[in-house]
Structure formats: structure tokens, C-alpha cells
Image (cartoon, rainbow, N blue to C red):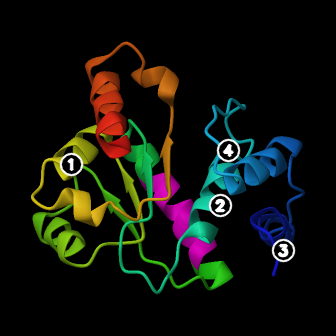
Amino acid sequence: MRTIAETSAQWLKTQGYTPHTFQCECWIKVSAHLNGLLMAPTGSGKTYALGLPMLLQAEASKKVLQGIWVTPLRALSYEIYQALEYANQSMGLGLQVALRNGDTPIKERQQQQKNSPQILVTTPESLHLLLATKGYSQRLESLKMIVIDEWHDLMGSKRGVMVELALSRLKS
């Protein structure tokens, strides 16, 4: 059985890319369940450094939320969603990757509550609302990974405090 690092590197190569050293290091550290901070230039592959392990750790047979990607910008949330869904589809993982932000229709949000995606891309506000719903702890008990994107934009703001509180609640 191939490791997350090997599978991620192979997939990137099939897409015509050579993995960067920082991506390989992330794959190994995520596989070891370590926390960390990733800083790299825009467009350098941060999404796949953390997104591929998130996808590869999730189990399609479990219809529960296993990964959350929080990003402060709706436009960026859509880009992250597209990148993760593309990797999911092209690797044939069979996961449900979903997007939830202020633009997500109520019907779709209700559907996500009934049939949880394995991976959710969301904003701080939508994560906060998710944590306020009845039965949230049962829906999140299989969470394996959470990514906070653009942390520097959140630090020292009300939205950053919301994320910190959400992380504290998730940890407990």
C-alpha cells in the first residue's frame, strides 16, 4: 500500500507537475498527524500540499465529515473547492466534497446536514453556524483534519477569534 506522500507525488506527476520539497514535507508531517504552519508564495501549490492528504485520509465508505478547509474569502473557497473536487474526481476517490458559505442555498445546507460530505470547504462564519447546529458533535466526531487558510488575514480580527473559538470547540 502506497503512502499519502507517494500517492500525492504520483498524482501531481500525472498532472504534469514535479512536487516541491515543502509539499513532500507536508505530506509526511500530515501522515504523522502533526500540526503546523505552512507559508509559501501564492500559486506554489499550498492547496495540494494540504488538500491531497485531506482527501487521501478520508474514507468514502464513511458518510461523515472528515476534513474541513476554512478560508476567509468566498471566492477563494470556491477555488479551493474546485481544486479538491478535481483531485477527488481524477483520483477516483469517490468522496463528497462540498462548499458551504453565505452564498450556499438553504436547501443545499439542509442536504449537507442530512447527508454529510466527507470534505467541507467553508468560511469562518459558516463554520461557526455549523458548530451551533443541533447534534454537531456527533457529525464531527470523525474529523481527521482541519486547514485554516490565509491565517494572516484572520489574526487579530473578529473572524480570527471566531476561528480560534471553533478550533477550541472542535478540540474538546
Left or right of 48 on screen, residue 169: left
Q: Position of residue 11 (x, y in %)?
A: 79, 71
Residue nearer the viewer, 59 or 101: 59
**Where are the magenta residues, as a range?**
78-88
Is residue 161 in the magenta section?
A: no
Could you tell me which residue is drawn at 65 percent across and 62 percent down?
A: 52
Which residue is tagged 2?
A: 53
Q: Quadrant of the N terminus?
A: bottom right
Of helix, strand and loop, which one carries label 3? helix
| Among the 4 quarters of the image, the one containing residue 107 | bottom left
Residue nearer the viewer, 3 or 14: 3
Depth check, mark 2 against mark 4: the one in front is 2
Q: CA distance from mark 2 to mark 4?
A: 12 Å
- Overall secondary structure of the magenta section: helix
Could you tell me which residue is drawn at 61 percent across and 39 percent down?
A: 35
Q: Earlier in the sequence, mark 2 or mark 4?
A: 4
Amino acid tagged 4: Lys
Amino acid tagged 1: Leu
Which residue is tagged 3?
A: 14
Amino acid tagged 3: Thr
